[in-house]
Image (spheres, grey):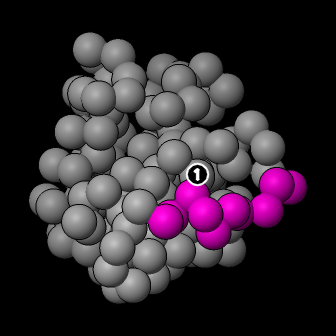
Amino acid sequence: MRAYARELAFQVIFEKLFVSNKDIDEEFFVSLKKEEDKTFAMEIINNYLAHKDDIEQIIKSHLIGYEIDRVYRVDLALISEAICEIIYLKTPVKIIINEVINLAKKYSTEKSGKFINGVLSSIVKDLKLN
């Protein structure tokens, strides 16, 4: 169920890209049966909220030929979610990249997986996180 908890966290991060001042509705996580999955999803979200500016700077500095405002919001949310897990939750890089690429296949464009993989690989390499 971690994958589903991650997916719900991504959805909240995506929403926060548009409406940052809206409170997180605990009912949104009712489908997560295990308390540890709810905790995991909230850890991702809380780390995103606490480090949003830093995460945005990391992403900006690794976009080649793109401005952050031109990146699909779904892709931006997925990259942000992955950075939260890699840096703050210490999720293994290979696991999180695989998971967000699967989410990209579900929620974004055909080319998004390759784009996300490229950005995240650049970040991981540059920050020596692998």
Secondary structure mainly formed by the magenta segment: loop
Callout 1 amino acid: Ile
Say whether residue 93 is left or right of residue 72. left
Residue 9 x, y percent position in the rendering: 48, 58
Q: Nearer the viewer, residue 20 or 70?
A: 20
Is 126 covered by the magenta stretch?
Answer: no
Is 28 covered by the magenta stretch?
Answer: yes
Q: Residues within 10 Å of mark 1 (few under 14, many from 20)?
A: many
Residue 124 x, y percent position in the rendering: 29, 59
Residue 116 x, y percent position in the rendering: 33, 36
Q: Nearer the viewer, residue 7 or 76?
A: 7
Question: At 48% from the left edge and 21% from the top edge, which residue is drawn?
Answer: 65
SS type, badge 1: helix
Q: Is residue 77 visible?
A: yes
Say whether residue 68 is left or right of residue 21. left
Residue 123 x, y percent position in the rendering: 36, 54
Say whether residue 86 is left or right of residue 47. left
Residue wearing tag 1: 13
Start and end of the magenta stretch?
21-30
Quadrant of res 89: bottom left
Q: Nearer the viewer, residue 4 or 109?
A: 4
How many numbered marks have been drawn onto this rendered protein structure? 1
